[in-house]
Image (cartoon, helix red, strand yellow):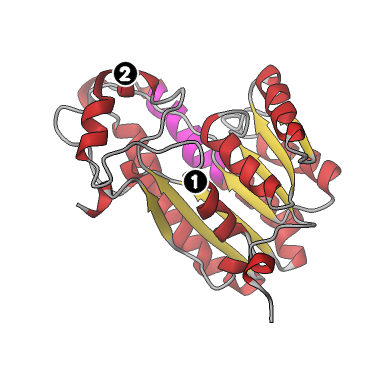
Amino acid sequence: MASVQDLFSLKGRTALVTGGSRGLGLQMALALGEQGATVVVSARKQAELDEAVATLAAQGIVAYAIAADLADPDAADALTIAALEKLGHIDILVNNAGASWGAPAEDMPLDAWDRVMNLNVRGVFLLTQAVGRRSMIPRRAGRIVNIASIAGLAGNPPGTMKTLAYNTSKGAIVNFTRTLAGEWGEYGINVNAIAPGFFPSKMTHGLLKTMGDRLAADAPLARLGGDEDLKGAVVLFASDAGRHITGQILAIDGGVSAV
């Protein structure tokens, strides 16, 4: 019988984390690496990726960086091929790369809508499809962790964000997760999603500067997310500890979505 420590171990596993150069992506890459996985982090900017790899290496994690812009439909397959050259196969895919745009719905520019959808939805689909075809389906094994958001579970409270495109894209990821879990279960692939609440990041910097205290006060735990608050969830979904969990959406939000 496996011990709890063994169930949560990722020794010998491989992982690809998009949007992995900073923020929540880097936090999750650290968690996977700390549990023994070899990690490829991907993002658009090579300099930020190099810093991320240095951070990972300082913790004794074997890590590689591959620059890619997943808003480009040709990037997903190229990233998959490059990651497989580094890793041999991909056990874990964390779809974290994303973008947002703030504007009243009536003023939302079409190019801004398309930018959000192309990265947050189409990019996730194309990369997941490529990784599935080239690695997970042939091996009949894999763990996919999609990063949704509590913004995909409900609308925005009045007087807060005006992020129709972002919320819509994350709602799509919620049902993408459930539907793909139903399809790919036969291949031994688990598909789950994490729905973070408000965490300090480059994306949320402006919002938290003006509304951070209010958002924290409105959470049952009266706090924002921190630098270690996604680590346990991503390891659960990526490891044998979560082998009987698929198609689930886990909100990590201090209780915001519960009330």
Examine the structure image and report whether residue 114 is included in the region drawn in magenta.
Answer: yes
Type of the residue with mark 2: Lys
Above or below, comparing residue 256 to residue 48 in the picture: below
Q: Nearer the viewer, residue 131 or 219?
A: 219
Quadrant of res 91: bottom right
Type of the residue with mark 1: Leu
Name the secondary structure under disc 1: loop
- Magenta range is 112-124
Instruction: Check residue 209 in the rendering and tell me which mark sits there, or answer none.
Output: 2
Q: Nearer the viewer, residue 9 or 173?
A: 9
Image check: 57 left or right of 7?
A: right
Above or below, comparing residue 108 to residue 247 in the picture: above
**Mark 2 neighbour density, 10 Å: few (under 14) some (14–19) many (20 or more):** few
At 62% from the left edge and 46% from the top edge, which residue is drawn?
Answer: 31
Q: Could you give the CA–CA distance between mark 2 and mark 1, rounded to whole angstroms? A: 22 Å
Instruction: Check residue 230 in the rendering and tell me which mark sits there, or answer none.
Output: 1
Residue 80 % position (x, y): 73, 43
Residue placed furthest toward the bottom: 1
At 59% from the left edge and 70% from the top edge, which residue is drawn?
Answer: 243
Above or below, comparing residue 26 to residue 249 in the picture: above
Residue 114 % position (x, y): 43, 29
